[in-house]
Image: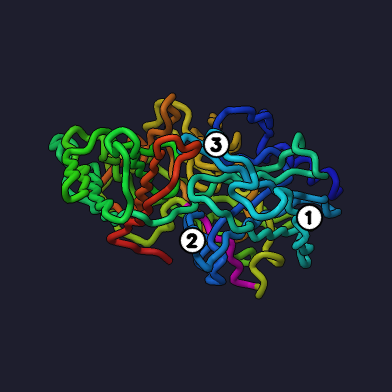
Amino acid sequence: MRGLLIAVIIFYLIIPESRSQGNKAYYDRIFEENIQSVRLFPNSGDFAAQLNSPVIGLNAGVMLNLSFDDLAYDPDMYSAKIIHCNMDWTPSDLKEPEYLDAFNEFNINDYNYSIDTRIPYIHYNFVLPRVTKSGNYVVMVYRNRDQNQVILTRRFMVFQNMVNLAARVVPPSQTETRRQVQQINVNLNYKGRDLFDPRNNLRVMIRQNQRWDNVKVLGNPTMLREDTRIIEYNLFDGSNAFFAGNEFRFVDLRLVRARGMNVRAIRMEEDVVYAEGGLDKTRANTVYSEYLDLNGQYAVMNMERLNHELESEYMVMTFNLSAEGITETPYIIGALTEWGFSPDAKMTLNKNNNTYETTLILKQGWYDYQYAYKRPDGWNSIQLEGSFFETENEYEVFVYYRDMGSRYDELIGYYNLNPNKRRL
């Protein structure tokens, strides 16, 4: 019975795509259906750290921790490799000894079995090694020391603050969308680092809520003064403006013996726990409502047991969206679906009740999500969720520099901007 259940669950999990990267860009991906709850975050010991961006200083005392579950009976031999990348996430020309002081294959030996859970799993932790160069990195995890058996890839950034960087949210220059967008102006001072031809060799990138599908790479600065070494990006063409979106919807799965917020039903079977969310509706024509959210992230939490990681149940969770006003197939976006890239993100229409549905396998916790339409250049959630300039968002500013004759992009500045932070 249990073997059949696992087979059914696997059907709903993430379907692997091509594992051969070559010189193509790396992405955050899960390549095997039994790998779940993948998180990469600063290993500070703080419970809330699992919500933080995988960005650390080059010589910081905090390391990054990779955490994931394997829905299996026996532990596999997993290894990890660190790959240095350019700004565009293609592999850089650096050799491994140039950015690592150790042989670039690390066995993941820290694992524990789940405790008294209906769906058994093995929880793995891996503290990433220190690197010696700033920039973009990928940790690649694979089975049996065979790099053709990749199970997951996760991106992270290591910065070395060599410029003074400031950013702020300002009223947008484009007045027609001023009540829907947030504009990010960036100023930097590079007195601490000699920059050769910064107009062409410096790149400033901004991302919103730790997502990669709508990042902005700023164009030419509005002011560059070489005498005072100040660069300003106070752009007027909207290229540094983001749709603010809406506060994320959420579902509280911290309980299995009672219904959490936005959970309509819980059913506990011998081998699995089923949960069903309430009936969601579009919010495009509603007014803005302020409440706490996790900016699209999720946290593994358990209100009934002590050990969040080992004693939390995996639940078969169904999301429901009313088809009223829906003009095309909706997707669920957020960290719970790899920001829409897992196949389970796509919803299907139940004609019996005129509702779009999808089922995800989720570990007990608190999950943020939104609905969106798929576009060639990313996701459009505005038509389903609305967009309000009051929305609280997290923005990160990255400053990359390619020195003359260099073989990689340095990350010489990082700034986290969250002026109206409201978090659980």
**Disc 2 and disc 3 in contact, CB within 8 angstroms:** no
Residue at 78% of width from left, 60% of height from top? 109
Q: Which of 242 and 252 is in front in this view?
A: 242
Badge number at residue 271: 1
Q: Taking 260 as reference, is 95 above or below it?
A: above
Whether residue 223 appears in this view of the structure is: yes
Q: How far apart are marks 1 and 2 (CA)?
A: 24 Å
Q: Taking 239 as reference, is 423 above or below it?
A: below
The way the protein has been coloured in the rendering is rainbow
Q: Taking 241 as reference, is 294 above or below it?
A: below
In the rendered image, which residue does mark 3 sit on? 92
Pick whichever of labels 1 and 2 is earlier in the sequence: 2
Name which quarter of the figure residue 45 lies in: bottom right
Q: What residue type is labelled 1?
A: Asp
Q: Is residue 159 rendered to the left or right of residue 122?
A: left
Q: SS at mark 3?
A: loop
Question: Which portion, as a residue range, is magenta?
Answer: 297-304
**301 inside magenta stretch:** yes
Q: Which amino acid does label 3 sit on?
A: Ser
Q: Is residue 84 rendered to the left or right of residue 123?
A: left
Q: How far apart are marks 3 and 1 (CA)?
A: 47 Å
Q: Is residue 382 rendered to the left or right of residue 114?
A: left
Badge number at residue 133: none
Other-residue count near label 3 (Cα within 10 Å), few / some / many at <14 / 14–19 / ≥20:
some
Q: SS at mark 2?
A: loop
Residue 64: x, y in percent? 57, 59
Residue at 40% of width from left, 26% of height from top? 327
In the rendered image, which residue does mark 2 sit on? 261
Q: SS at mark 1?
A: loop
